[in-house]
Image: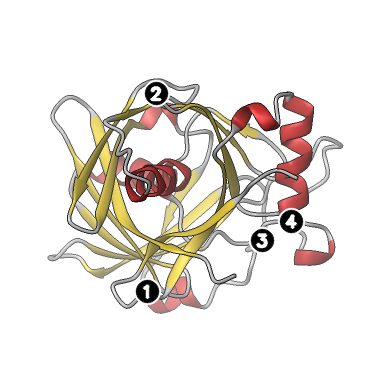
């Protein structure tokens, strides 16, 4: 049986929230693309990450329905796990490119680029209350990151994320049936979308997402954006 670590990534300061992540430390145990896709679908987490080369930091990221070239919460979670095992990485290498890793107390930071983020739409709403009132998922197709200023002067954002993914048959997986279809109706915390929003706004953000998650971001002059947060082991 494949050994699996399960974490919650982008937890709030009180340990609440966090998006669940599956980590397969021995990627060689699940060598084929089809096998990895099947395992990610079976687990049903927003993402599952396979560590293929611990020395180089080579990783492979899957959602329940697609393979991703880059995603924030799997890389933050994996970096935290490797540090907890005494092997803190300086670089991780998903398909998109080299991702610098930095540790700042209990915050794990990874740096990526907006062009690495798969197609999704950021949509501003008038208030945090309006974001909170959205149905899950909102009507429409395509990946939606709904946000509003909670405190614009301080850069605090209220956000919710709705994958509204299309499966291999061209059928929407986010149809409100949730667990009955294996769909991810709403992502609790989403690093790539936070990176994209930060790139669009051009300023550091403190994002409060989902039921209790927190994502920190910082843009850099070279066009990269750092995404950071806390990681907690998931309850057994």
Q: Is residue 63 above or below residue 46?
A: above
* Label 4 to label 3: alpha-carbon separation: 6 Å
* Label 2 to label 1: alpha-carbon separation: 30 Å
Check disc 4: other Cα within 10 Å, few if <14, some if 14-19, many if 20+.
Answer: many
Q: Quadrant of residue 178?
A: bottom right
Q: Mark 4–mark 3 contact, CB under 8 Å?
A: yes
Q: Earlier in the sequence, mark 2 or mark 1?
A: 1
| Label ID, residue 55 | 2
Which numbered mark, 4 or 1, is in the foreground of this view? 1
User: Which quadrant is home to the C terminus?
Assistant: bottom right
Q: Nearer the viewer, residue 81 or 160?
A: 81
Which numbered mark, 4 or 2, is in the foreground of this view? 2
Q: Position of residue 133 (x, y in %)?
A: 52, 78
Instruction: Give the left or right position of residue 66, taking residue 110 as reference.
Output: right
Secondary element at image label 1: loop
Instruction: Give the left or right position of residue 185, taking residue 50 as reference.
Output: right
- Identify residue for label 1: 15
Q: Mark 1–mark 3 contact, CB under 8 Å?
A: no
Q: Is residue 66 above or below residue 161?
A: above
Q: Quadrant of residue 198?
A: top left
- Identify residue for label 3: 185
- Identify residue for label 4: 183
């Amino acid at each position: 049986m494949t050994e699996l670590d399960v974490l919650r990534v982008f937890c709030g300061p009180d340990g609440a929230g966090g998006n669940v992540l599956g980590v397969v430390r021995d990627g060689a145990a699940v060598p084929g693309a089809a096998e990895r896709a099947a395992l990610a679908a079976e687990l049903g987490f927003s993402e599952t990450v396979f560590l293929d080369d611990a020395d180089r930091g080579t990783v492979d990221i899957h959602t329940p329905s697609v393979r991703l070239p880059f995603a924030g919460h799997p890389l933050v979670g994996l970096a935290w796990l490797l540090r907890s095992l005494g092997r803190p990485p300086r670089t991780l290498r998903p398909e998109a490119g080299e991702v610098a890793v930095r540790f700042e107390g209990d915050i794990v930071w990874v740096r990526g680029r907006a062009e690495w983020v798969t197609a999704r739409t950021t949509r501003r709403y008038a208030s945090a209350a309006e974001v909170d009132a959205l149905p899950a998922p909102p009507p429409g197709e395509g990946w939606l990151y709904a946000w509003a200023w909670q405190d614009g002067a301080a850069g605090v954002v209220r956000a919710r994320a709705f994958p509204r993914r299309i499966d291999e048959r061209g059928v929407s997986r986010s149809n409100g049936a949730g667990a009955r279809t294996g769909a991810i109706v709403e992502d609790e915390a989403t690093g790539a979308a936070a990176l994209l929003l930060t790139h669009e706004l051009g300023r550091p953000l403190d994002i409060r997402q989902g039921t209790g998650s927190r994502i920190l971001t910082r843009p850099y002059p070279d066009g990269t954006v750092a995404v950071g947060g806390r990681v907690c082991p998931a309850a057994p």
